[in-house]
Amino acid sequence: MRFSPFVLVIFACLLGFCADSGSSPSGKTSYTNASRGLPYDRYFHKLAEEGKFSGSVLVALPDTVFEQSYRLKGAPERMNASSNYRYPIGEIAHILIRAAYFRMADQGRIMLNGPVKDYLPNLPQSETINYRMILDHRAGLPEVLPKGQSLSDLTYRSQPGIEEHYSQLGYEMLAAVLAERMGTTVAEAIRILVLEPATMTRTGVLDRTNAPGSFAAGFSDAGGSLAEVQLSEFPSTIIPEYYSNITDLFYLAQWMPESAFLKGELKQPGVRPGYRSYFYSSLESGETRVVLSNFGGNDLGALVRGVANTRL
């Protein structure tokens, strides 16, 4: 279930693109139903007070939009959080690739259940593996390409199509095929197929040498004290490094159900030095949860469980 255009306009106003809608000591708060947002507010406020969370949170149901930003207790001056801030989203970029594939399928550019052999001929069993298997992490691929191994002599973790195994390698292969199929770069293909139609105007490819405006500085406590993380520490793969904010990821969740091929739930955590992120969207109920944090000391697993177990 998607929000009506009227509700989306209200949401935009609540996020600060119209008149300011209110504030709290820990940051700006926006609600369409204030009392229903209190469980999440209590949960994240407690984490911030305990020195365990800094960042922005959005939870949306058909009749409720809760949005709040929290500042880590005792945080240095540059460690700020705001709904308008852009954060690196890490592996949430996989959702962008996934959306691009469903968009191509809608347009008749690719068959999700078709074999990958035409674009990945060197992949063993490429005649039996299809794009849907890779998108769903059910192709039996390893998480990454083992050192010293090439694609042609790849060892599978399980028989393709049977078990779910997270694979970064699978999404790197999907990114390469996406660029080839669209005849352009991965970033340009995602812009055309996803960012523009979803009106994600605050999302883009991160320049590791020059962060965009309104960018949340990330911090780590790995050395026992808070230290700002340099973007040059981020990994580099064929998949571009994206930044976004909670508003754009909400728009993505609202736009995704327009694909005839997309059903069920989307879940994706993201990890980068000094940053943690989480995206969840139920395409049937319309529930969306987005967490973007500029504190690398978060226990992401505990954070995801806490978000999932908290109910409005």
Image (spheres, rainbow, N blue to C red):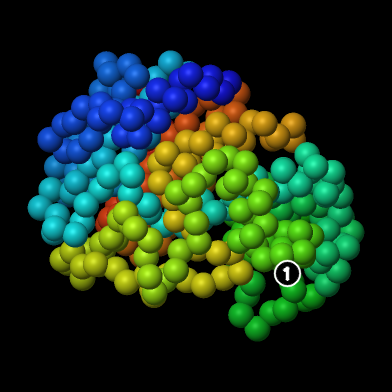
Q: Residues within 10 Å of mark 1 (few under 14, many from 20)?
A: some
In the displayed structure, would residue 172 be above or below residue 39? below
Q: In the rendering, at what x and y percent does residue 260 appear?
A: 74, 32
Amino acid type at circle 1 is: Thr
- In the shown orientation, is residue 186 left or right of residue 249? right
Residue 131, image x, y percentages:
77, 51
Give the residue drawn at x 59%, y 34%: 255
Residue 7 coordinates in the image, percent (x, y): 46, 20
User: Which residue is the extreme one toward the left?
Assistant: 74
Residue 179 relative to residue 309: left or right: right
| Quarter occupied by the N terminus | top right
Residue at the spot 26% in from the left edge and 40% down from the top edge: 69
From the viewer's perspective, tell me whether residue 97 is left or right of residue 88. Answer: right
Numbered circles on residues, count: 1
Residue at figure coordinates x 14%, y 42% from the top left: 49
Image spot of residue 140 (x, y percent) = 71, 57
Seen in the picture, residue 210 relative to 277 is either above or below; the reply is: below
Seen from the viewer's position, the closer of residues 101 and 193 is 193
* Nearer to the camera, 22 or 64: 22
Where does label 1 land, which residue? 155
Along the viewing direction, whichever of 25 and 163 lies nearer the viewer: 25
Where, by quadrant of the figure, is residue 232 drawn? Answer: bottom left
Do we see residue 158 in this rendering? Answer: no
Q: Which of 37 and 81 lies nearest the eye of the viewer? A: 81
In which quadrant of the rendered image does the C terminus lie?
A: top left
Does residue 23 appear anywhere in the picture? Answer: yes
Q: Quadrant of residue 19?
A: top left
Task: Name the residue at the front extreme.
Answer: 18
Query: For numbered disc 1, what is the local secondary structure?
Result: loop
Left or right, 312 with respect to 220, comes to right
Residue pictured at 86% horizontal, 54% vertical: 115
